[in-house]
Image (tube, rainbow, N blue to C red):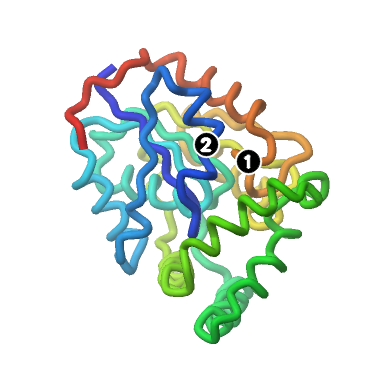
Amino acid sequence: MNARLILLPGLAADETMWEAQCAALAEWEPLVTDVHMLGHETVEAMAAALLARHQGDLLLCGASMGGMIAMEAARQAPERIDGLALLGTTARPETPEMRQLRETAIELFGQGRAMEVIEANVAFAFHADQAHDAELVRSYLDFVQRAGAEQLIRQNRAVMCRPDARGHLSALSCPTLVMCGDSDQLTPPECSAEIAELVPGAELATVARCGHMLTMEQPAVVNAILKAWLERFAPGPEAAPA
């Protein structure tokens, strides 16, 4: 396979959210990118940085904000994207309601009150079953806290100003997998269904008893779906190193 498998984390997330996938998909030699952490102010700039950093053909697997970056990269360079896996994400622009919630959160981040926001977000990020898993929640809180207030502010602003991806999805021709948790409160299943309807030939998979953080909440199920999708791409990327 000539395409490099790139895993794109969500807002404020790092390789922790892909830990189970990196192990399960080792034969495809996945690489977790941190382009969202490099100071770029927009989703468009993050996608451009991704394409500049990782040369050659790419398989992009993005979760949440990572999915937004993946869709934008496919718009900017469709000829370089061999496949897309979009997990718990949306192609829609920001709603006024979510914009107001993010503005309030940004104020609190600026006041050094990030933990108030991210601890309250646990109930929205996870299915009720997983929201009571102390180890899982601690892992989530740790990586968001590691990102820090500056990243939380900048990345939230980038998501608030994200482009409406729905206009270009029908032009995609690469194999596309769309996956979501059945109880995702942040990017509800209807958002994934919309993407799957717009992308020609897209596969839609819904993970039961799962919220927004599906790679961490239901890793065995997510890994099985991803592996089945990746079987069409021979393992062992030969792309030039990043």
- The residue under the point 54% across, 86% down is 111
- Tell me which corner region of the image, top left, top right, bottom left or bottom right, holds residue 2: top left
Residue type indicated by callout 1: Met
In the foreground, 94 or 25: 25
In the foreground, 226 or 163: 226
x%, y% of residue 13? 49, 53
In the foreground, 108 or 134: 134
- The residue under the point 54% across, 49% down is 89
Q: Secondary structure at mark 2?
A: helix
- Residue at numbered disc 1: 216
Residue type indicated by callout 2: Glu
Q: Is residue 190 above or below residue 97?
A: above
Q: Callout 1: few (<14), some (14-19), or many (20+) C-alpha neighbours within 10 Å?
A: many
| Left or right for 104, reference 177 | right
In the foreground, 198 or 221: 221
Dot placed on the residue nearer the N-terminal end, 1 or 2: 2
| Left or right for 135, reference 132 | left
Q: Secondary structure at mark 1?
A: helix
x%, y% of residue 87? 55, 41
x%, y% of residue 157? 44, 72
Give me the disc on residue 19: 2
Q: Give me the C-alpha separation between circle 1 and circle 2.
A: 8 Å
